[in-house]
Image (tube, rainbow, N blue to C red):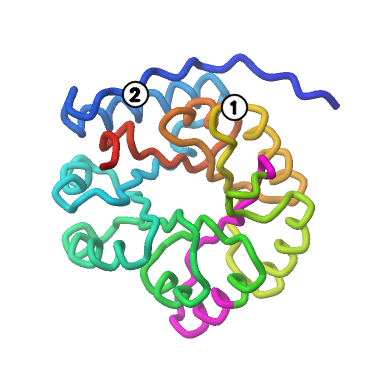
């Protein structure tokens, strides 16, 4: 069946880093998510905004926590370990998402720290996470990363290899929440988001971690349950 692209909201341009306080940018992004969800006849509350705080200091994160933001994304286990234990003492209901490529030898530390792991992309990591969950008695949500654009420089399993990886994850009793992708840079994201949504439906998965600062509204319109927004909130990274 041919893919017919729906009418999508046009992404608003990203604000310059110092145009407004981060809490105002947070309110704007939440409003844009709500509008995109409404266009798609979805409930805005079904979309989780992950504030991507990687490389940003605690001082930049605290205003968002005070404003009620509770889901944050980090790329590296070591950076998350340095920043989040103290913040979680003050904001214990915070949910931490590891969104970067994860080394198998960091699986136990990741399981001990994270509430969700968004880049499960290979058999060795599935096995390492299964062992770590048994050792730590914690079961963070897992998203299987799909290399949706078949790009050799990116992580993620191929579309063809996903059924086998999913079967391994289910056999290992990982709590598979859904799929994650990064569409090719410089290309229209909508077809790739639509493809990931179809693949998820075909495999009985409801979670879709897709959409970032430049395309999160498109992702929400096409079914994203988690959007990962960094620069539109915090400004460009150094």
- The residue that mark 2 highlights is 14
- Determine the image quadrant of residue 77: bottom left
Q: Residue at x 59, y 29 (%)?
A: 189
Circle 1 SS class:
loop
Q: Which mark is residue 107?
A: none
Residue 214, given in percent of the width and then of the height, sits at 44, 28
Residue 100, given in percent of the width and then of the height, sits at 46, 56
- The residue that mark 1 highlights is 187
Residue 64, given in percent of the width and then of the height, sits at 22, 42
Q: Are marks 2 and 1 in contact (CB under 8 Å)?
A: no
Which segment is the magenta one? 128-150
Of the residues tagged 2 and 1, which is closer to the observer?
Answer: 1
Q: 10 Å neighbourhood of mark 2: few (<14), some, or many (≥20)?
A: some
Circle 2 SS class:
loop
- Determine the image quadrant of residue 27: top left
Q: 10 Å neighbourhood of mark 1: few (<14), some, or many (≥20)?
A: few
Q: Quadrant of the C terminus?
A: top left
Given residues 43 and 125, the one toward you in this image is: 125
Mark before the other along the chain sequence, 2 or 1 = 2
């Amino acid at each position: 069946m041919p893919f017919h692209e729906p009418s999508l909201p046009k992404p608003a341009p990203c604000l310059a880093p110092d145009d407004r306080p981060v809490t105002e940018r947070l309110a704007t992004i939440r409003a844009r998510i709500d509008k995109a969800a409404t266009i798609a006849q979805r409930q805005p509350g079904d979309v989780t905004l992950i504030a991507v705080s990687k490389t940003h200091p605690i001082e930049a994160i605290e205003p968002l926590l005070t404003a009620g933001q509770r889901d944050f994304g980090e790329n590296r286990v070591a950076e998350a370990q340095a920043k989040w234990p103290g913040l979680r003492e003050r904001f214990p209901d915070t949910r931490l998402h590891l969104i970067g490529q994860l080394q198998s030898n960091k699986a136990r530390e990741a399981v001990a720290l994270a509430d969700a792991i968004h880049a499960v992309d290979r058999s060795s990591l599935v096995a390492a996470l299964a062992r770590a969950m048994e050792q730590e008695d914690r079961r963070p949500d897992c998203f299987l990363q799909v290399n949706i654009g078949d790009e050799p420089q990116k992580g993620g399993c191929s579309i063809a290899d996903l059924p086998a990886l999913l079967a391994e994850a289910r056999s290992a009793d990982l709590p598979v929440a859904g799929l994650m992708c990064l569409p090719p840079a410089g290309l229209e994201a909508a077809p790739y988001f639509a493809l990931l949504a179809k693949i998820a439906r075909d495999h009985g998965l409801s979670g879709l971690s897709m959409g970032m600062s430049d395309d999160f509204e498109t992702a929400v319109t096409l079914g994203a349950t988690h959007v990962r927004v960094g620069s539109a909130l915090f400004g460009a990274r150094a």
